[in-house]
Image (tube, grey):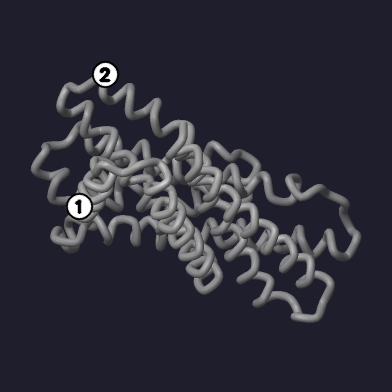
Amino acid sequence: MVLESIFPAKKIESKPIDMLVLSLIIAFVSVFAAWWIYPAAAGIISPLLVTVAMTPVVYRILIHEEEVEAEEAEKKISETFWQRHGEVIVLFGLFFIGNFISIFAIALLFPQEFVENAFSQQLADIAAVSGMAGAALTGSMLLSPIITNNLRVMLFAFALSFMFATGALFILSWNASILALFLATFLRQGLYTEFAMKTAGILPHVPIEMLAYFLAGIAGGMLSAGVIREKIESPEFKLVLRDSLLLLGLSVLAVVVGGLVEVYL
């Protein structure tokens, strides 16, 4: 792939901002490619295309992550948990932001008819969530379904990443498009005050929820690479398994904290 040669994994690791640029370009192109392939399901196909296009780069990054784990287990290096995993968490965050910016720009700049058709699946989800939020429910009544839904998405991200190494990219791309379309709607309608209020309202909890999905995706992808590359009984695999479970545990904690922040702040 041309973009893969321009933005190789090693370059992205040394210059993380390239992940933002690469994901922005791929998300933009994927929307129109999906529209051209099958307009009726473009909203589903575009995140799939993003996942396919980003897989070679992200897989190499996860392989490197597993190699760092192996070196730590062999005592060749001595790094903290954050030193081992902080960089890839940042890269996943930049991937999400790149997708968000791209979809947000399309939703603002392109005709309403195109946006409604190209993202019909996302807009249906937004309408369903808005309907639930508009119901007369107390905080305690909202908390359980929010946490349950986010846990389901988080575990799905982990499972996809374990089976396909980079499967969480689909979850992140989908959620970035949902958030971008939701916020862009207010600007398209000239509701600038509502846009500011909604943005301020989601800022406390959305980063926490996205962090949960980042951590789950990294945990699943790293464990997938460890299963393939290491012997199950080896110290290297045991460290990979330990860190994967720790990342998954932190992901669950982030889901719970994010739910509490969303309901009560």
Q: Circle 2 sits in a helix, a strand or a loop, which is it? A: helix
| Relative vertical location of residue 131 with respect to residue 221 in this rendering, above or below | above
- Name the residue at 57% across, 48% down: 254
Residue that carries the numbered disc 1 in the rendered image: 124
Furthest residue toward left:
113
Residue sitting farthest toward the right: 75
| Quadrant of res 194 | top left
Residue 156 at x, y percent in the picture: 46, 65
Rendered position, 233 above or below 194:
below
To which residue does mark 2 refer? 193
Can residue 1 be seen at all in this image of the molecule?
Answer: no
User: Amino acid under label 1?
Assistant: Ala
x and y percentages locating residue 201 in the rendered image? 39, 29
Q: Is residue 210 visible?
A: yes
- Where 62 falls versus 110 (above or below)? below
Q: Residue at x 60, y 47 (%)?
A: 89
Does residue 230 appear to the left or right of 108 in the view shown?
right
Identify the residue at image location x=78%, y=65%: 239
Q: Quick one: label 1 or label 2, which is nearer the N terminus?
A: 1
Residue 61, percent across and down? 61, 56
Q: Is residue 90 left or right of residue 56?
A: right
- Identify the image quadrant of residue 69: bottom right
